[in-house]
Each structure stands twice: as structure tokens, then as C-alpha cells.
């Protein structure tokens, strides 16, 4: 069983844990293919997932946004496995998934503004960045040694059933290798993590298709949007921060591994075209121009483009409106070459 940890561990201790786990995810360890179990997300699958999580393992779970890679958030060893499996940089914090605002309040300080947002949008695709309680039973790597913690109560019935089956919160970033396309199906998870995690709960395709909106609730009651998503809030201003305070803020992210050209009205030679509205493509986000449908299909089309024999991807213009803001955010990061 993963060792529960109260408070934070140092960056050096976290690095040592990651180094110790390297062999587990090397050619002699879980990188061997066909070691990842796949189960239907029924009662038996959820019970199996709960047992794996209890013992400190990793489980990919569907949420209403994308598939998440879950581990118990109170175990330094379990959380270190997330970073090792994903190849995730240690300065990039994780979202902690909770059952409700009561459980969130055990980890974070909920102001009146935060409580109101939780009552209005939870369970659902809104993550709140709040001051972390000093006594919170969280592995230090979850917060990346920041004074804040990101918490969310998800709405997907499978993730909610899993949270009810365990007595600890779950740290769960997207279930893919760091920097690559997020997964909206079990097959997408296996494309980059097969052999690197213990189990995938297959709950079918996710619905929202893009990750949760992340909102920081500041001490003065002001709201800063750190990442756009399915929940579009008035009164929150976009954060202009130089550092990483929440997931999804890296300049290059969601990358398909080949060049991406945006605002394309047609395909150039050698391009896989992702269409929208009146611009048809090899894969079309929404022929009807429905932004919600486009969001749900975004990562699926990017996965198809990545698997295509064509060496480049082009994407039709997407309106900068409603959830289109989140779609364009993901596309701009996908089109940004890694450092």
C-alpha cells in the first residue's frame, strides 16, 4: 500500500522517488506490452480499480472531460508513479478529484466565493485552485510545492463511483504521455500508456472532449481563469502568469507529434485536414458548426491526424466563442513546437 503522507516532501525527495521508479517503467519493467489490464467500467471493474488504487497503483478512468490517470493523492509513491508513467515535469501540479465540497474542504480553504462556485458547478468540469490546508493529507508532488491545490468534483458516473469506493482523494491528470494528445477513449489511453499503468476502466468515449475549466479563487475574492474549458464564466479574467500554477499552462501541449497549421480553409499537399462548418476535412469536428460537438471530437480528430500517413495537420478556423475559446487554446498549444 502507498505510504500516506501529510504535508509536502522536498523536490529532492520527489526526485529520488522518481529515480527509484525508473526501473519499474524501463524496458525491464512495466513498459513491456500487454501488461495493462482493460476492464469494462461496471461494478466488478470499479471494485478492481479501487483495490489497485488502494495498493498504490495507477488506473485510467473516464471522466466527463477526458480519461484521467488516477492514483491515491495521499501517497508519495503512488503520485510519483503518475509522473514517471507520463514523463511529466515535476513543476506541473495535478488536479485532485474529490466526491464533493466537504471532501474538498479537508484539503483546501474554501472561501464564500469558492463555496458558491462549488454549489453551482459541482459535480462538473470546473477545477478550483484554492489555498492548500497545511494539514491536508496530500503528497507534496500533487501541488508541486505550491501553496495552492487544484480540486474538482467530477460528474462522470464511473469516476464518482470510484471516489465513493475509496476513502482517499484521487490525483488524476489526463491519461497520456506528457505533452501529447489527451485521451477521450480507452484506446487513446493505451496508445501511449499501454504497459506503463495497471488498469484502464473502459467507459466508452468521453462527452465534453476537452479538459475542465480551471479557475483560481484569490484571497480578495477575484477570479482568474487559468485554463479555459467547458464551463464558461463571466466575471473571471484570463490570468497572465509567467509560471505554472495549474495543469494545461505549458506553451506546448496536446501535441500530435507533427506540424499543425491553424485557420486553414483547405489542405495543402501532405496535410491531414481537420474540418469545421463549411470547411470539410479528412476528419470533421462538426459539419453543422456546433462548438460542443467540435469539442467532443477535437482530440479524436487530432489522434486520427497523428496516425495518418500525411506528415502535417491543418485545422479549419474555429470561432473564438463559448467553448470555442477552449478549443482554440488547445489547438494553439498543439501547434506550438516543444522547446
Image (tube, rainbow, N blue to C red):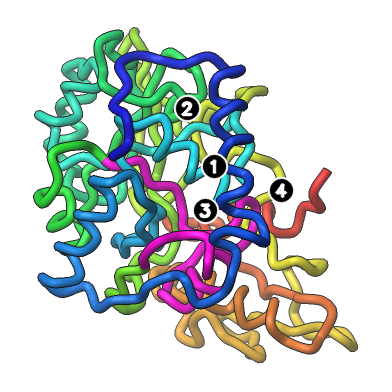
User: How far apart are the alpha carbons under marks 4 and 2?
Assistant: 22 Å
Q: Regarding mark 3 in the picture, which secondary structure is present there?
A: helix
Q: Nearer the viewer, residue 27 or 172?
A: 27
- Quarter occupied by the C terminus: top right
Tell me which numbered mark, 3 or 1, is placed earlier along the sequence.
Answer: 1
Q: Which residues are magenta?
A: 170-199
Q: Residue at x 28, y 49 (%)?
A: 53
Q: Nearer the viewer, residue 306 or 26?
A: 26
User: How far apart are the alpha carbons under marks 3 and 1?
Assistant: 28 Å
Residue that badge 2 annotates: 141
- When asked about the image quadrant of residue 250, the answer is top right
Q: Residues within 10 Å of mark 1 (few under 14, many from 20)?
A: many
Q: Residues within 10 Å of mark 4 (few under 14, many from 20)?
A: some
* Mark drawn on residue 325: 3
Q: Position of residue 71 (x, y in %)?
A: 35, 45
User: How far apart are the alpha carbons under marks 2 and 3?
Assistant: 30 Å
Q: Are marks 4 and 1 in contact (CB under 8 Å)?
A: no
Farthest residue in the right direction? 269
- Quarter occupied by the N terminus: top left
Q: Position of residue 135 (x, y in %)?
A: 25, 11
| Residue 278 counted in the magenta span | no
Amino acid at each position: 500500500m502507498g505510504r500516506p503522507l501529510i504535508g509536502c516532501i522536498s523536490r529532492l525527495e520527489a526526485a529520488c522517488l522518481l529515480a527509484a521508479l525508473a526501473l519499474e517503467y524501463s524496458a525491464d519493467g512495466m513498459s513491456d506490452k500487454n501488461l495493462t489490464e482493460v476492464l469494462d467500467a461496471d461494478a466488478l471493474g470499479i471494485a478492481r480499480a479501487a483495490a489497485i488504487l488502494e495498493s498504490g497503483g495507477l488506473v485510467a478512468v473516464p471522466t466527463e472531460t477526458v480519461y484521467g490517470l488516477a492514483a491515491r493523492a495521499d501517497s508519495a509513491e503512488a503520485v510519483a508513479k503518475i509522473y514517471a508513467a507520463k514523463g511529466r515535469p515535476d513543476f506541473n501540479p495535478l488536479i485532485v478529484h474529490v466526491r464533493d465540497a466537504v471532501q474538498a474542504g479537508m484539503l483546501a480553504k474554501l472561501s464564500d466565493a469558492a463555496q458558491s462556485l462549488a454549489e453551482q458547478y459541482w459535480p462538473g468540469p470546473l477545477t478550483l485552485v484554492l489555498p492548500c490546508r497545511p494539514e491536508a493529507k496530500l503528497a507534496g508532488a500533487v501541488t508541486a510545492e505550491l501553496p495552492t491545490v487544484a480540486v474538482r468534483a467530477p460528474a462522470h458516473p464511473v469516476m464518482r463511483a470510484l471516489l465513493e469506493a475509496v476513502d482517499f482523494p484521487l490525483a488524476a491528470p489526463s491519461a497520456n504521455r506528457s505533452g501529447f494528445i489527451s485521451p477521450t477513449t480507452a484506446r487513446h489511453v493505451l496508445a501511449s500508456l499501454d504497459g506503463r499503468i495497471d488498469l484502464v476502466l473502459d467507459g466508452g468515449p468521453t462527452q465534453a472532449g476537452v479538459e475542465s475549466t480551471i479557475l483560481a479563487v484569490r484571497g480578495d475574492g477575484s477570479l482568474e481563469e487559468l485554463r479555459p474549458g467547458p464551463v464558461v464564466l463571466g466575471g473571471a479574467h484570463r490570468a497572465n502568469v509567467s509560471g505554472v500554477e495549474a495543469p494545461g499552462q505549458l506553451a506546448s501541449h496536446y501535441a500530435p507529434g507533427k506540424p499543425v497549421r491553424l485557420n486553414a480553409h483547405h489542405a495543402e499537399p501532405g496535410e491531414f485536414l481537420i474540418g469545421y462548418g463549411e470547411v470539410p476535412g479528412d476528419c470533421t469536428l462538426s459539419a453543422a458548426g456546433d462548438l460542443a460537438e467540435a469539442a467532443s471530437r477535437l482530440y479524436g480528430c487530432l489522434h486520427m491526424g497523428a496516425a495518418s500517413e500525411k506528415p502535417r495537420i491543418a485545422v479549419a478556423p474555429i470561432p473564438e466563442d463559448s467553448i470555442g475559446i477552449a478549443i482554440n487554446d488547445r489547438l494553439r498549444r498543439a501547434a506550438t513546437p516543444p522547446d
